[in-house]
Amino acid sequence: MNVTINSIHFDAAEKLEQFINKKVEKLSKHNEEIDSVEVTLKVVKPETAMNKEASVKLIVPQHDDLFASKVADTFEEAIDNCVDALKRQLEKSKKDK
């Protein structure tokens, strides 16, 4: 599984990138066909709380791409929320087969 991390207007710390990789790798347990994952991180309004936005797109061959976008106080929390949402989407797509 290929993981691409795009951080818009800032450089993501290596620790954050490792956290993201660890979290999205777990999604392969729910669907081994996941080809690649695109993660986009951006700061929404720097002067407010709840300003870290994470978007995660799963590319699964021969299926519709799955997408989740969440805003939270930290990128880690936003990624956690995205991964939870994508797990639910993966489970639902399994049932729909």
Image (tube, rainbow, N blue to C red):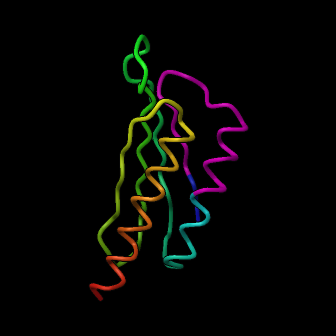
Residue visible at 38% across and 42% down in the picture: 70
**Left or right: where 34 falls relative to 48:** right
Q: Quadrant of the C terminus?
A: bottom left
Image location of residue 73, percent across then percent down: 48, 29
Q: Quadrant of the N terminus?
A: bottom right
Residue 49, quarter of picture: top left
Image location of residue 24, percent across then percent down: 57, 58
Find out whether residue 10 is within the magenta segment. yes
* Residue 52 vertical position relative to residue 87 in the rendered view, above or below: above
* Residue 38 vertical position relative to residue 14 in the rendered view, above or below: below
Image location of residue 56, percent across then percent down: 43, 51
Residue visible at 72% across and 36% down in the picture: 14
Question: In front: 11, or 20?
Answer: 20
Image location of residue 34, percent across then percent down: 49, 71
**Left or right: where 3 falls relative to 49:** right
Residue visible at 54% across and 79% down in the picture: 32
**Left or right: where 60 falls relative to 96:** right
**Left or right: where 2 falls relative to 85:** right
Question: In front: 60, or 15?
Answer: 15
Q: How many marks?
A: 0
- The residue segment tinted magenta is 4-23
Name of the residue lying farthest toward the bottom: 97
Find out whether residue 80 is within the magenta segment. no
Residue visible at 32% across and 85% down in the picture: 95
